[in-house]
Amino acid sequence: MNEISDRYPGLGLTQTQHVRLCPEGMPLDTQVTFGPIDVAYETYGRLNDNKDNAILVCHALSGGAHAAGWMEGASQPGWWDNMIGPGKAFDTDKYFVICANVLGGCYGTTGPASIDPETGKPYGLRFPVVTVSDMVNVQARLLDHLGVEELLTVTGGSMGGMLALQWAVSYPKRVRSVIAIATTYRHSPQQIAFNELTRQSIMADPGWNNGDYYGGEGPRLGLAVARMTGHITYLSDKGMELKFGRRLRAREKYGFDFSKEFEVETYLQHQGKSFVNRFDANSMLYLTKALDYFDLSDNHQDLTEAFKGCQDSLFLLVAFSSDWLYPAQQLKDIARAVRRAGGDATYYEINSDYGHDAFLLDYEKQAPLVQSFLHRVATTEIPRQPG
Amino acid sequence: MNEISDRYPGLGLTQTQHVRLCPEGMPLDTQVTFGPIDVAYETYGRLNDNKDNAILVCHALSGGAHAAGWMEGASQPGWWDNMIGPGKAFDTDKYFVICANVLGGCYGTTGPASIDPETGKPYGLRFPVVTVSDMVNVQARLLDHLGVEELLTVTGGSMGGMLALQWAVSYPKRVRSVIAIATTYRHSPQQIAFNELTRQSIMADPGWNNGDYYGGEGPRLGLAVARMTGHITYLSDKGMELKFGRRLRAREKYGFDFSKEFEVETYLQHQGKSFVNRFDANSMLYLTKALDYFDLSDNHQDLTEAFKGCQDSLFLLVAFSSDWLYPAQQLKDIARAVRRAGGDATYYEINSDYGHDAFLLDYEKQAPLVQSFLHRVATTEIPRQPG
């Protein structure tokens, strides 16, 4: 036992679970009814008898259900292990933490690489376009399955933050609080532009073959280029300066050729190539499209009106100073809209050079904010509105 | 005549000229000797008898020698026509303006698409890697050919600004003044990263065929994706918000598919596709690589030392507030280094939402700065150092 806890500190080995939901299908935003839907999820800690200690953690674009703890033999723990575990910000000695792979993903939940029961082959582009709201609806079915009626908090960074905000709007009665980090209430044209670049990189690769590549190589080069785009936007200018500068990799002087030579090139190419082995290109298309459609103010007069039903939820909005992909202003706008709608919002900007990646890396600054906010949530009596 | 001046206002029709230089070859930074080199250039206005009214204009990555005036039948004038012409900032009634396509380009000056006299076929990747310094050396030979010993000013935005700065360092005696706009003294890792993304987009396209695609289709999709990257970096977040917002193109509501639907997607795809018809993919590789190698502080203790020989030149550095590709700080750093080296530098930041593109678009704010600086240059007696 000691040997295992040495090798796998924190939560130790964790296991991804699977459940089949919506056997009769679930209505999507596109008006299509879709199902059944397999959902991959992990849980950490225990649901208490009052069932009021559940926290839903929502992952970002390339994440999955494995948020914390270790897979057997893995060299790295789950993607938010620095935030989730005994004594950590999301303290598994106190809270029951749930993380599920989103609809359209490629880490165990039904997505374009899953087998279409009608054809016996992977969906590919026959998979329906899904929205952030659809993803949240699937998560709500999962909570039903787990016997969790109300969430103490729903949280996430980047795409995960959008899901958290969507939760508050879609299911205000089930959400005590929201911690939305490094995210937005709607994708801006610049954010759409980077996603479109990602999609065009994939679709320009002949290996993509209109999404029908399973069993073959697939769009390996296109997906790698797409991932390079992502990583440029996840780092800050200053962070890159500190991390790479103009240093050369394995060379004393310029090679005057087109092989990788600057460290930053090596980093990006490595990130691109390794991503291809762990992510499905079609999922990247579907998830980026869901983000681009995301606009909480849609079908409302303005964002304030969208939060009108959320007076019973407490909001913590966290931005990072050097995050230019999801700039601080977007989170300030959310805080202001929540307050104007009569709600309770705390906005905090963390000073960091990590850029957008800070929500994954800068846990030393992030964790205390989360802890004190959760303390406040647990000790704040919210007057329930009638009905 | 009147009809022509109505159709082609300003400088009217202009003509690109061609000259073969360096018949015995020119030594490059790579130690390779390369030549002959054909140079395409245009001139506007007249060289005066004192030969002290010459201005060299250096183009950016995708530009060429056609800086001002009109090509027969063209719907648009040259790329800096709003700055160059009778009565404009670079007043062709007063000045003799020269613009030449750079070494490695694809608008008439020898580059990878040119015929290699040794093989009778396009160079492709047999073309030598060139640097900003090499480009400037070719321009110096062109000035020799034109009988221009000293430049009243050398100017340019983006890559053109780098050439202008390199001129001051390489040929301090030939440069009375420098106007460097929206540029840098060395490519930062983020700037290298975007260029590497550009190159990888091209090289991932099987149509690139290791640079040997002339006579065929070439890497059309890859080059289009590369150009989309460029255009994202040329606009600002706020500029995109003003220009596109989340508006849909030719649709009332979301299409829930992967065709272009947001206006920003339509814009980027259009820019990408039309670029393919006017630019050579290999030139894009060579020019971006030259930019990445650019570092004026290379082989010097620091940037200040690089400018030690430039006390006789006046510098104007212009930044744009929303330019995040070449941020204002980089131009401030240049101004400071010039001053520390005992030189004369004026720094100005123009408030603009146009992002990096502002140097091409925001001429109403840019022109008066240039005009008053040129007036100062013309009326300032610079004490010539002995020797």
Image: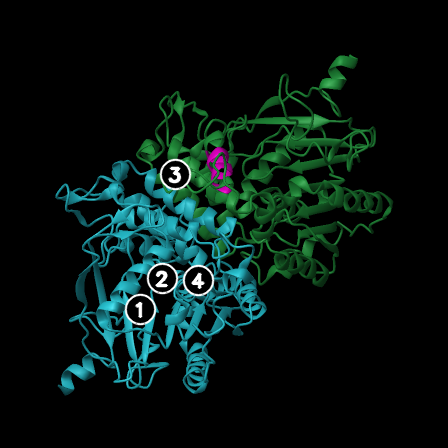
Chain colours: A green, B cyan
The amino acid sitting under disc 1 is: Trp
Asked whether disc 2 touches disc 1, contact meaning CB atoms under 8 Å apart, the reply is yes
Q: Is residue A104 above or below residue A8?
A: below
Q: Position of residue B126 (x, y in %)?
A: 25, 41
Question: Label 1, on which residue?
Answer: B79
Q: Is residue A260 magenta?
A: no
Q: Distance of mark 4 from mark 2, alpha carbons? A: 25 Å
Give the secondary structure at mark 2: loop
Residue at point 60% right, 55% down?
A: A327
Q: Which residues are magenta?
A: A264-272
Asked whether disc 3 touches disc 4, contact meaning CB atoms under 8 Å apart, the reply is no
Q: Position of residue A278 (x, y in %)?
A: 50, 27
Question: Label 3, on which residue?
Answer: A202
The amino acid sitting under disc 2 is: Ala
Q: Position of residue A191 (x, y in %)?
A: 50, 52
In the rendered view, does B219 fall on the left or right side of A307? left
Residue A365 seen in the current view: yes
Q: Is residue A39 above or below residue B19?
A: above
In the rendered view, does B248 fall on the left or right side of B147? right
Q: Distance of mark 2 from mark 1, alpha carbons? A: 10 Å
Q: Distance of mark 4 from mark 1, alpha carbons? A: 23 Å
Return the mark for residue B244: 4
The chain letter under disc 3 is A
The amino acid sitting under disc 4 is: Phe
How packed mark 1 is, by other alpha carbons closer than 10 Å (few <14, some 14-19, many 20 or more), is: many
Q: Earlier in the sequence, mark 4 or mark 2?
A: 2
Residue B252 seen in the current view: no
Give the secondary structure at mark 3: helix
Question: Label 2, on which residue?
Answer: B60
Residue closer to the observer: A81 or B324: B324
